[in-house]
């Protein structure tokens, strides 16, 4: 495996691939040679002079370049026969996402929705409890990274993908509002998503907050769960009836702590070997992008 793009996230991919015993990590490429050389030196791998040479040496590739370049970089890799994990969002447009899906043609195309691999998220999805109302807060302190996309494609799309995993019914309605604060693009957004099942979700995403908050709350008939992405804990309550009396009892869900990005890479490696594992594939990545773009359209309509 190799990594193309050694920015903030690509560096972490390189760090973990250098540790995975089942992976022969052949190296990295970045169009900024000094950055690639620094990452290669840090993790004891090779910095390749061009992407074609790295692709010749690899069977699979992590693409961690800016979103606008995902299709241009990943489509030729897929066409060469490589399996590809492309960072989220899958692409900048649905047309580019469709190009990636067409180029995959039977090969593994995974999308880096890393929060899906949070152990608490996996434990919640395993409950198979159809939600009726979901509330999500994803608030972050401003950093100058990922400013090529707005906060919906940068942060909210994590929770959009997880919502689709919790409720597989079609999206029925989208309402949203957002404003730019410190960048030319929307930095804080709120969206109300209604699904055909009747489930309604209220999502808030901000990259200009004073503190970091990552929390998802799920309300279902007789059950409530509060998931903290950062601590990887799920607190729960359940209404039960005992001896003719109704009372509320604790219903916490255990989750074993782990690094989500490592779990994501392990799942990608397993998928490349033909194993059936939980994975955010190209189709699911496109679905999350489509919903995120609808949120963007709804925000634009409010201005």
Image (tube, rainbow, N blue to C red):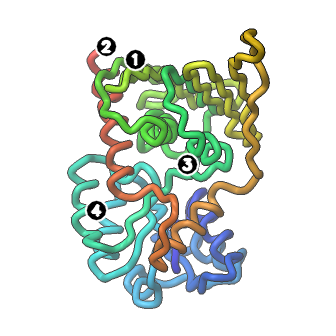
Vertical placement of residue 172 versus 261, above or below:
above
Residue identifier under label 4: 100
Residue extending farthest front: 243
Residue identifier under label 1: 177
Distance from the alpha carbon under mark 4 to that under mark 3: 21 Å
Q: Quadrant of residue 42?
A: bottom right
Query: Which SS class for mark 3?
Result: helix
- Residue 38 shown left or right of residue 174 in the figure: right
The x and y percentages for residue 292 are: 37, 35
Lower position in the chain sequence, tag 3 or tag 1: 3
Q: Are marks 1 and 4 in contact (CB under 8 Å)?
A: no
**Where, quadrant-wise, is the C terminus in this rendering?**
top left
Query: Which SS class for mark 2?
Result: helix
The x and y percentages for residue 14 are: 62, 71
Q: Is residue 218 visible?
A: yes
Lower position in the chain sequence, tag 2 or tag 4: 4
Lower position in the chain sequence, tag 1 or tag 4: 4
Residue identifier under label 2: 302
The x and y percentages for residue 65 are: 45, 61
Vertical placement of residue 64 versus 26, above or below:
above
Distance from the alpha carbon under mark 3 to that under mark 1: 25 Å
The residue shown at (29%, 24%) is 172
């Amino acid at each position: 495996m190799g990594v193309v793009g050694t920015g903030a996230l690509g560096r972490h991919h390189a760090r973990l691939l250098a540790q995975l015993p089942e992976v022969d990590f052949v190296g990295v490429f970045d169009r900024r040679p000094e950055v690639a050389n620094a990452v290669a030196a840090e993790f004891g791998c090779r910095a390749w002079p061009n992407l074609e040479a790295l692709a010749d040496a690899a069977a699979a590739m992590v693409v961690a370049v800016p979103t606008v370049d995902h299709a241009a970089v990943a489509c030729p890799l897929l066409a060469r026969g490589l399996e590809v994990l492309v960072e989220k969002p899958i692409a900048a447009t649905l047309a580019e996402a469709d190009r990636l899906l067409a180029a995959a043609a039977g090969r593994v195309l995974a999308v880096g929705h890393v929060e899906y691999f949070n152990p608490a998220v996996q434990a919640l999805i395993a409950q198979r409890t159809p939600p009726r109302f979901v509330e999500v807060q994803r608030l972050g302190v401003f950093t100058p990274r990922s400013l090529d996309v707005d906060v919906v494609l940068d942060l909210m799309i994590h929770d959009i993908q997880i919502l689709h995993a919790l409720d597989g019914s079609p999206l029925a309605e989208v309402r949203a509002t957002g404003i730019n604060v410190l960048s030319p693009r929307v930095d804080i957004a709120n969206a109300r998503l209604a699904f055909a099942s009747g489930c309604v979700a209220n999502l808030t995403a901000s990259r200009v907050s004073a503190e970091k908050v990552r929390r998802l709350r799920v309300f279902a008939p007789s059950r409530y769960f509060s998931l903290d992405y950062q601590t990887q804990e799920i607190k729960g309550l359940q209404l039960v009836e005992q001896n003719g009396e109704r009372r509320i009892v604790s219903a916490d869900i255990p989750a074993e702590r782990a690094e989500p990005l490592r779990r994501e890479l392990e799942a990608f490696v397993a998928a490349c070997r033909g194993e059936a594992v939980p994975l955010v594939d190209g189709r699911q990545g496109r679905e999350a992008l489509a919903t995120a773009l609808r949120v963007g359209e709804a925000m634009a309509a409010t201005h």
